[in-house]
Image: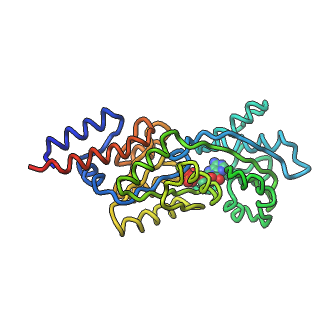
Amino acid sequence: STPVATFCALSRAATSGLLIKGGDYLEILAKIKYMAFDKTGTITRGEFTLTDFRSLAHDIPLTTLLYWLSSIESKSSHPIAAVLVDYGHGQGVEPKPENVENFQNFPGEGVFGKMDGREIYIGNKKLGQRANCTVDPNIVGDDNTKEALTCGYIYSGGALIGSFSLSDDCRSGAAEAIKELKSMGIRTALLTGDSQSTAMRAQEQVGKGLDAVHAELLPEDKARIIADYKKDGPTAMVGDGVNDAPALATADVGISMGVSGSALATETGHVILMSNDIRKIPKAIKLARKTRRKVI
Ligand code: ADP
Ligand code: MG
């Protein structure tokens, strides 16, 4: 395309809320063959609702468990953390992050902290291995798995001491965007650190338009899958920067959510979606294709 056509296209995109960091990315956008989406915060709104919270240890009162949970989570920036802290507030439990020792974040798995002399792990099934818990969380997760909610577990001393479940809706416009991309000949995929059942539910919610679903991934697994797609053609990754920054950086074009996205996302992304409206993505590709044809 001509420099003028590129300049015009970049400003048009910017006006519509899509910041493209240079003409090179516009060129690649025109040729994209694969587009992978992160789930939480990207396909879904990342605004969780707590649907269940319980203690699984008869000697631990619910308020004590909630105090540990909200204190440890108040040190995390994951969207799951915010809803748990809010729930604590609603129950009159004030988090005390200053009482949390040795806080650790395990991307794609959950968090760890020591409180009241207890080592506490909060996260998914995968985190159970780290917590040396041999109990299969499926014993509590059965109903929740059927509803395909995001399940969380609290482990301590090698035991499962609590569980919670959360629901998160798909963004309006997600189904439409994926359908549009498909009609443009682009193959789409969902990448998530969440469970297979929750991933399938998201796939259903977006009208089954996604060509592939990959679940239970760590951030480095997401990056590896992007690297695999790249071998077969130009690949874009759309994410919010929470546990997907390596995948955004690996993609030929990393598209990051601007509003809910982490600071890391806006830094790593080659394209920033200012409004979080993913329908802008197929529009940008159409614009990129049109611009490419404008050759002197
Ligand atoms: P996604 O790939 O869908 O965007 P993430 O990679 O952010 O999801 O997280 C994957 C899973 O790790 C979550 O579904 C959750 O079970 C667990 N997890 C991550 N961070 C936390 C946290 N702070 N508290 C509880 N669970 C967490
Ligand atoms: Mg995410």
- Report whether residue 244 is seen: yes
Q: Is residue 218 above or below residue 101?
A: below
Relative image position of residue 51 (x, y in whole percent): 74, 42
Q: On the picture, is 280 further left or further right than 219? A: left
Relative image position of residue 217 (x, y in whole percent): 56, 61
- Report whether residue 104 is seen: no
Residue most extreme to the right: 58
Q: On the picture, is 165 further left or further right than 289? A: right
Q: Is residue 137 above or below residue 66?
A: below
Relative image position of residue 247 (x, y in whole percent): 45, 57
Q: On the picture, is 256 further left or further right than 95? A: left
Number of dots carrying numbers = 0
Residue most extreme to the left: 296
Specify the color scheme. Answer: rainbow
Residue at screen point 39% across, 59% down: 34
Q: Is residue 180 above or below residue 130?
A: above
Residue at screen point 67% across, 62% down: 126
Query: In this view of the protein, which residue sits in the foreground, 214 or 161?
Result: 214
Relative image position of residue 134 (x, y in whole percent): 78, 67
Residue at screen point 45% across, 46% down: 264
